[in-house]
Amino acid sequence: MDLFFKLVAPLYDRVMGRHATEAVTKQILSIAALADGGRVLDVGGGTGRIAAGLRVNGTRVVVLDSSRDMLAQARRKGGLALVQGSALRIPFPDGAFDLAMCVDAFHHLPQPQAVAAEVARVLRPGGILFIQDYDVARLPVRLLAFGERVMRSKGRFFRPDDLKALLASAGLTLVSETRDGLAYTVVAEKQELCRGQRV
């Protein structure tokens, strides 16, 4: 997958399109009233295309991604904290973020159950997780999933109900779900301390 991201990184923002980027950014801002000093974690945030639009009201935005090439594109946007690393070991303390998001990336992450638990750990109680991805029940997404397996992707696409169950097992409570064509969005909230989180 390293070669894939090296090739895709310079083109990614253009391929995804400004309209799609603005629509997702607007959706996130509508569900997560970001206050002064708010803290946002973009898990698998790549080029920072969504994170860049969330720098409002003094919000601090961190983009976490394993790809150096994608983060090099994010660096060009300025004003984002960039961390190269794994979503399996997020290098921040418990409760460090008000909002975590994962847009078009959850299917790339290996060990999704462990990732969900780790994201829940770094959310504060009352914090929000926003995930937008593609429904593997749809034929075009199944074809995309096959292509990604050929490129040795270690992740997998989920049906919405399966993702909701995975998030619930990590201690996150469903707030809303929307579907738009091949994509769907799940918004969940951390109610209290999650399994493995220190008091």
Image (spheres, rainbow, N blue to C red):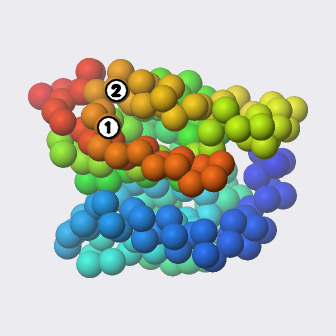
The residue nearer to you, when weighing 92 against 36, is 36
- In terms of image quadrants, where is residue 152? top right
Q: Residue at x 26, y 53 (%)?
A: 98
Query: Type of residue at label 2?
Result: Ala
Q: Is residue 146 above or below residue 43?
A: above
Q: Is residue 101 above or below residue 61?
A: above
Q: Give the structural element (helix, strand or loop) at label 2.
A: helix
- In terms of image quadrants, where is residue 85? top right
| Residue topped by disc 1 | 174
Circle 2 Cα neighbour tier, 10 Å, few/some/many (<14 / 14–19 / ≥20): some
Q: Position of residue 73 (x, y in %)?
A: 66, 69
Circle 1 Cα neighbour tier, 10 Å, few/some/many (<14 / 14–19 / ≥20): some
Q: Position of residue 68 (x, y in %)?
A: 66, 55
Q: Is residue 1 visible from the viewing direction of this image?
A: no
| Residue topped by disc 2 | 168
Q: Position of residue 22 (x, y in %)?
A: 53, 74
Instruction: Choose the circle earlier in sequence order: 1 or 2.
Output: 2
Alpha-carbon span between mark 1 and mark 2: 7 Å
Q: Is residue 109 visible from the viewing direction of this image?
A: yes
In the drawing, does residue 61 fall left or right of residue 115?
Answer: left
Q: Residue at x 50, y 26 (%)?
A: 162
The residue nearer to you, when weighing 149 against 91, is 149
Q: Position of residue 31 (x, y in %)?
A: 31, 60
Q: Residue at x 41, y 45 (%)?
A: 177
